[in-house]
Image: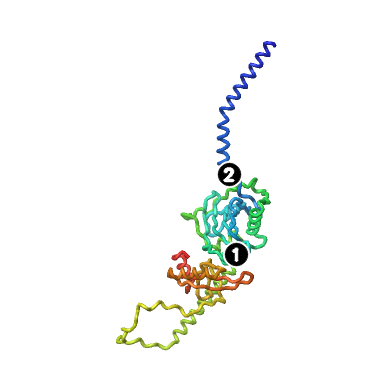
Amino acid sequence: MRLSHIYFFKYIYYHSFEMKKMIRRILPFLILFSIVYAQTSPAKKWVIIQDLQDRIVYLDTSAIKTYDNQLSVWGLSIFRTPQRVTPFTEEVLQIKSNLLFNNVTKTYSVIGTLYYDKSNRIIGESAPPRITGGEDSFEYPIQPGSSIESLYQKAFTYKTTGKLEVESSEYLANTDFSKENQRTAPQSQPTSSDTTIQPSGPIIISPEQNIALIDEANKKTIEKRDSLAAANRELREKKLEETKMNESMKPAVNPPSNKSDLSNINLDAKKPSKSKTKYDETSDANVRGNIWSDGIKYVIQLSSWREKNIAEKLVEDKQKDGHEAFLMQVDLPGRGTWYRVRVGYFDTLEEAQNYKRNNNL
């Protein structure tokens, strides 16, 4: 063997040995880097289900939950440009909502909604009425062709089959909305309203305002309820005026003499007098949240059940707690008989709201 060949093989052996040593040194760092990257890289759980002209709608595939005939879903809408939305003083870029669907009646309720500005800061939120179960908890119908319907259909399909057809978007390159949005979100020009005093925390908006923002297809439902509430107020005010007029026309009654014998009256046995006005169940309608009215009186609905014995037990428990609880039976077309647990009666909507808030109903 020539001497040059011997030197060549020695060279190869030496450098291959050094290469192995170098690989052994850097291998732990490569493994550590891979683990850290896997833990910190964003999981693409949000998928695009609609690419609309003004916004993109996402579904969180990792947070779809089922409860009997109910489906809990997280949805997200990102506007192509920040929007001026009442009552917020800052522009809204993202709206994230947790929705609870009823698979049987094809209706839904909003568990909660968060509003974000272009800096991904929460500027508003909405907490709806308490979800109590039964046929009245799901307040809004799923309108055909709406984003809400698309959210429901995609979530239901994914939960039952494990498959999902994801929409592509010309606006975002991938479904990692938070990372992509920071690069592509346009910067709005400052306006005169930007100089106004900013609120110290997120603005709380009513359920009606919230629905109008996240589900435009149900605006007519909201308008119908608002008009019903207005009609109920007018009817109540009219009947109050008639009552006052009738009272003024009654002949005056002389007060009893101070010398009357009151020794036989047991004052402790007297209970607060209740209004003689009966609640008209035929005019029963939802006014706001879980507050109902017949146009004159207002009641708070706590829950609704198919089993009468369960409803009666809840009424009994509430009565023991000191509430004027009662049971109301309704027959709903296509849904059967339901037993509603209620507390009442209240003369005004404000009185019912205060009682509900003070007693956590």
Decide if residue 197 is in sight here. Answer: no
Q: Secondary structure at mark 2?
A: loop
Above or below, 245 against 359 in this view is below
Say left or right for 272 vs 149.
Answer: left
Residue 231, how many percent across, how many down?
Answer: 55, 74
Decide if residue 190 is in sight here. Answer: yes
The part of the image, by quadrant, that contains residue 34 is: top right
Ranked by sequence position, the earlier of labels 2 and 1 is: 2
Judging by the rendered image, the residue that carries numbered circle 1 is 140
Residue 121, how many percent across, how many down?
Answer: 52, 50
Above or below, 11 against 249 in this view is above
Judging by the rendered image, the residue that carries numbered circle 2 is 42
Above or below, 61 against 227 in this view is above
The Cα atoms of the two marked residues, 2 and 1, are separated by 34 Å
Q: Could you say which disc has been placed on residue 179 in the image?
A: none
Residue 329, how many percent across, how many down?
Answer: 55, 73
Give the residue drawn at x 44%, y 78%. Answer: 274
Residue placed farthest to the left in the image?
A: 259
Neighbour tally class for label 2: few under 14, some 14-19, many 20 plus, Cα within 10 Å: few
